[in-house]
Amino acid sequence: MTAARDSVQNQTEGSPDTPPGEGTQPEASKGSGLELRGLTKVFRGRHGEQVVAVDDIDLKIEHGEYVVLLGPSGCGKTTTLRMIGGHEEPTSGEIVLDDENLAGLPPNKRPTTTVFQHFALFPHKTVLANVEFGPKMHGVSKEQRHERAVEALDVVGLREFADRKPAALSGGQQQRVALARVLVTEPKALLLDEPLGDLDRLLRLKMRVELRNLQRETGLMFIHVTHDQEESLSVADRIVVMWEGRIAQIGDPLTISTKPDTEVVAAFMGDNNIFRGTVARRDSDYVEIEGDDKITIRLAGEQPGLDVGAPASVSVGAGAMKVAFDDTSSGGVNGLECGISTVEYLGDLVKLHLESDGKQLLAKVGAERYPELVRREGARVRASWSSEDVRLLRT
Amino acid sequence: MSGSSAPESAATAGVPLGLGSRIGGFLRRRRGLVTAAWAAPGTLWLLFFLVAPVIFIVLVGFWERTITGFDESWTLDNFRSVFGSDVYWDTLRQSFQNALIVVAASLVLGFPVAYFLAIEVESLRNQIAFFIIALAPFWTSFLIRAVAWVPMMGREGALNRGLMDLGVIDKPLDFLLFSNFAVIVGMLQLYILFMVAPLFFMLAQIDKASLEAARDLGANWFKTFREVILPQVAPGIVIGSIFVFVLSMGDFGTTRVLGGATVSSVGLIVQNEVTSVQFPQAAASATILVLFMMVGVFVLLRFSNLREEL
């Protein structure tokens, strides 16, 4: 399978029949990449009102990069992807791929191809004919497109299913056909619209690894839309978190996961404890925030710009929380006494839902502590964290 | 089968022997009974209202004609006279030709309507609303619709008047009414919905994302149509063509109202024979018409493997 993948990759690089519309760049990987400039999409709502789906987005994506657009439904991630693919016209803004402005080009003239959420295979065509479709539309000769399609089916391990109709395949197999069908067109950018959304959980976990490997092996630019945080962390080189039509934060998975920039990102990524308050004291190497819920949080670093009396909100990751039974002292800095409301065992870790004076907190501790924690709902504990793990959020 | 002394074994499938497999067999037969019960009303309906009358008509075609109807003595005279009648064969040819024209025209004119309804109209609500509007002609009887063409298309009708007022023509066009042209146009407007409806339902089943995928993979509109839409809608074309073909071949009402004295159809011949109490002759004419239609339907079915594609 690896050999077959290599051969497709070689072909990708050395193929003489570049589809029309690919511009003057013979090799996709050497262009300047994809750039979205001020991209905006305004829809007309049901009652004629204007709905801003995508609001003035700037984004640059390099060739060979795996980027995930992450956000809740309605955040504009799919609309953004559809504009890149040419399935929606931007209201304003530019989409530039390797110095070629794509705006105004129909999807069939764009060097991008899309894997659709529900696969969108052609039900009346065999698997092979589905995969051959792209090259056929680009005028590739019968022998060549057959050869390429068979190779692409090899890549996804479905060669023996070539003569079946899509309906005779499982969801995961259909997903692979959809992948083969776009890979064979040698796109400059591969767009994936919730590609794993139709699969069951185990298959999703498996396919996301395959997607990641496929991207590594082909070296293509992948732009993947999902609402699944874990999926984005698993596959992405870079995650673009979107919220209400705007980009909330861009970062690598580690940054997005552990250092959310804004309350919105912290809340959406989950497992973050968010505290709001005002700056009470500051020193050369820390700032203390008096939380609205009477919790005092100390934030490491000088934090220029945070003056005493200014409002501030911070987050502490659930994983950074320490939970101790022997010390139930209340008050103090970066810690409080609280009760365990739920102990949730997740296999590799234990999630503790804590409560103190109506404030809900989350803590994640190692699974080895499960025996000590099981059925300890109601017990009093002290939750604490270090000032290095406190993250200041932009408002 | 049951009651033999062979050992019971799950491996010897298909040879129910023990109690368990006997119950299984009974349940299987029961399931057959349930299926039969569901199918029974429809089957009885078809037997009583379609199969029996057709058999009866064929029989009558082989019976002697009498002043008051027919007599149950066998003869081939009725068929002999139909086969020997140039008028019958000319009319059959005319009906066949008209039916083909109506099928082709309803396909060409009906496809855009169905395409618009199923593909271009996005919300299901609007689709249903437009479809009901398209069905509006069916709210009146076909005779009224056919008769309504007379003031439209006649010598003094609205169309001729309008064209003359506009100066397009200086004397009325005669072929607009009481002509074969009028019959074809009339049948087209009566039967086109039998084409639009199956096309609409087939088109509405097409996954719109697959059309997007086709565009995405490099197909322009025309190639998308040819490669993705047309193959999937083919069964609808065949079904619609069968409807329109059969209805047009058997038509007599439209022909009578809009064809005047100049145009005939096999349906009209049969009807005339019935009104003049020549039942066996009418039966023979009708039998040959039905045979001809069956051949037509068979040929149409060859264009598409309905069983597999539906």
Image: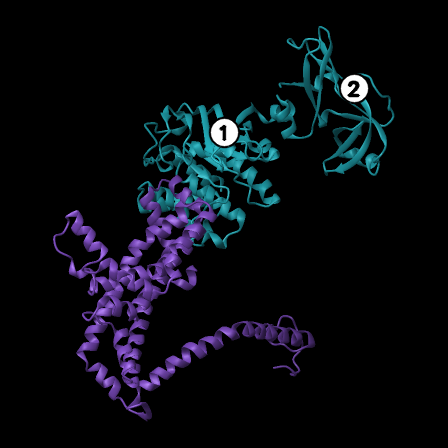
Chain colours: A cyan, B purple
- Left/right of residue B99 with respect to residue B41 in the rendered view: left
Q: Earlier in the sequence, mark 2 or mark 1?
A: 1
Give the CA separation, mark 2 to mark 1.
39 Å
Q: Residue A251: image x %, image y %?
A: 57, 23
Q: Residue at x 27, y 81 (%)?
A: B273
Where is mark 1, residue-wise?
A52
Q: Residue at x 49, y 73 (%)?
A: B42
What chain letter is assigned to the residue under label 2? A
Q: How many marks?
A: 2
Binning the other alpha carbons within 10 Å of mark 1 as few (below 14), some (14 to 19) or many (20 upward) gives some
- Left/right of residue A282 with respect to residue B114 in the rendered view: right
What chain letter is assigned to the residue under label 1? A
Q: Residue A108: image x %, image y %?
A: 36, 38
Q: Residue at x 78, y 30 (%)?
A: A354
Task: Identify the image quadrant of residue B66.
Answer: bottom left
Where is mark 2, residue-wise?
A294
- Which residue, as the protein is rendered here, is positioned at the far left? B170
The C terminus of chain A lies in quadrant: top right
The answer to whether one can see residue A222 in this image is no
Q: Is residue A219 above or below residue B84?
A: above
Amino acid on which the number 1 mark rests in the picture: Val
Closer to the camera in the image, B19 or B27: B27
Closer to the camera in the image, A333 or A28: A333
Q: Secondary structure at mark 2?
A: loop
State yes or no: discs 2 and 1 in contact (Cβ < 8 Å): no
The answer to whether one can see residue B100 in this image is yes
Of badges 2 and 1, nearer the viewer stands 1
Q: Residue B228: image x %, image y %?
A: 37, 49
Q: Is residue B247 above or below residue A210?
A: below
Q: Is residue B197 above or below residue A329?
A: below
Q: Secondary structure at mark 1?
A: strand
